[in-house]
Image (tube, rainbow, N blue to C red):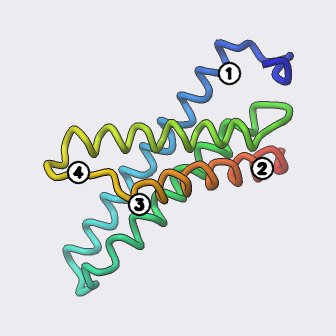
Amino acid sequence: MSYFKNQNSSNYYTDIIKGTILGLILTIILIFIFTIILTYTKLSESLIPLINSIIMIIGITSGAVFISRKVDKKGWLSGGLIGVLYFFVIFILGILFIEDFTIDKYSLIKGLMAIVTGCIGGMIGINIK
């Protein structure tokens, strides 16, 4: 981790965890808001997969921007780590709470989307310092 010379490595890992938690909390809040909107309006339930993907992108991007503003370079790598951890947490929650959870091409695409979104969010965050 030589590219994080002015970063204390334990602080860096703590910030990665904080960024992931920030993204997950934002995701929970947005899903809660979307659930209320879906309950009290006539929105079609066919929008759920699209809105879930958008919410995931917002959550990962916010966590990636948070961490990449704290590092000096390679924000894409820090953001990518946020994407990996975020997806890992969501994946584990899916295994634990969804009875018929399966690993298919859609979950692999979501994982790739999480990593790419994190990398892009990291690039954005490093450039808005």
Name the residue carrying label 1: 12
x 81%, y 44%: residue: 126
Element at badge 1? Answer: helix
* Horizontal and vertical percent position of residue 57: 53, 59
Instruction: Tell me the amino acid under the disc marked 2.
Output: Met
Element at badge 4? Answer: loop
Name the residue carrying label 2: 123
x 48%, y 41%: residue: 86
Q: Could you classify mark 1 by the number of other residues whose Cα lies within 10 Å: few (under 14), some (14-19), or many (20 or more)? A: some
Marks 4 and 1 sit apart, C-alpha to C-alpha, by: 33 Å
Pick whichever of labels 4 and 1 is earlier in the sequence.
Answer: 1
Marks 1 and 3 sit apart, C-alpha to C-alpha, by: 32 Å
Element at badge 2? Answer: helix
Instruction: Tell me the amino acid under the disc marked 3.
Output: Lys
Number of marks drawn: 4
Relative to 2, is 107 above or below? Answer: below
Name the residue carrying label 3: 105
Q: Could you classify mark 3 by the number of other residues whose Cα lies within 10 Å: few (under 14), some (14-19), or many (20 or more)? A: few
